[in-house]
Amino acid sequence: MIQIHTIEEWRDYAAQLRSAGQTVGLVPTMGALHEGHGSLVRRAVADGAVPIVTIFVNPRQFNDAQDLAAYPRDEAADLANCEAWGAAAVVTPSVHEMWPTSPATTATTVSVTGVTELFEGEGRPGHFDGVASVVTKLFAITGPARAYFGEKDFQQLAMVRRLNEDLSLGMTIVSCPIVRDEDGLALSSRNVQLDGEGRRVALGFSRALRAVADRPRTARDVRAVVRTALESSGIAVAYAEVVEPLLLDPIGNQHEGTARVLLAGVVQGVRLIDNGDVTIVSSEGE
Ligand code: PAF
């Protein structure tokens, strides 16, 4: 496995792979890697792609300076994990390398409308513009045939799919299921910011999802059950909504079939998200 620091070296490396007929698989991350990221790298290997992992804590997607400062970083552990998972290269650019004019706002911002407006978009102004801008840059430098994203950040995944379609980037966006600890907590780089009590409270997310996954329910029922489960666990709820899985429109009373529950809340000052599938039955005429 090689480590790359500069855009020039990174662009050349990916171009060489492509001209040798290899399939380049991009795994964008912000480091503090865990088995969720591992599942993305392993999936790229299983697909026959050459996995390039990027580790870059992108300041432009943080709307809160404290959140950026508190974001966990452990480069030595990340590199060891990437090697074990089968990455071919890890790219660790500096902030100056990626955004030379930072902290001043760079001139070009990529903005995906629609799917980004509610949920994380509402709670974290500017967040999705920061993500869309950085992933567009990662795609432009790497030129991957495939890019790997986790379902944990379900709205981000929906946004990246839109970006790929709307700008005809021609990549295959591969989504991988959420990886959970044995107790049900969805793996997240932010979990290390919780103590034992915070972790116990955060289990309310997976408990809420399990509570509505048992049988088909009306959307109204799903909203009520998940909110009660979150609140009774001590989570300060940011949103608890049931949406159509591609465009993320909140679903109405006529919807039937598979939908996605999106949850967010704050535990010990840490904003956490989770999501899962539900089957919805119409409540029209109730
Ligand atoms: O999901 C993340 O870790 C980040 O939002 C991403 C996609 C690497 C962009 O910075």
Image (cartoon, helix red, strand yellow):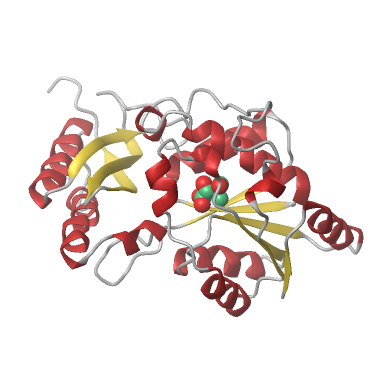
The N terminus lies in quadrant:
bottom right
| Residue situated furthest right in the rendering | 19
> Residue 143, image x and y in percent?
78, 49
> Which quarter of the figure has residue 82?
bottom right
Q: In this rendering, does residue 171 appear at all?
A: no
On the rendered structure, is 145 left or right of 33?
A: right
**Foreground: 245 or 4?**
4
On the rendered structure, is 218 left or right of 273?
A: left
> Which quarter of the figure has residue 2?
bottom right
| Residue situated furthest top in the rendering | 285
Q: In this rendering, does residue 227 appear at all?
A: yes
The C terminus lies in quadrant:
top left
On the rendered structure, is 134 left or right of 168?
A: left
> Residue 166, image x and y in percent?
66, 28
> Residue 209, image x and y in percent?
24, 51
On the rendered structure, is 158 left or right of 281?
A: right
107, above or below 273, in the image: above
> Residue 182, image x and y in percent?
28, 72
122, above or below 191, in the image: above
Residue drawn at x 20%, y 34% as measured from the top left: 218
120, above or below 254, in the image: below
Residue drawn at x 24%, y 45% as measured from the top left: 266
Count of marks overlaid on the render: 0
**Foreground: 271 or 5?**
5
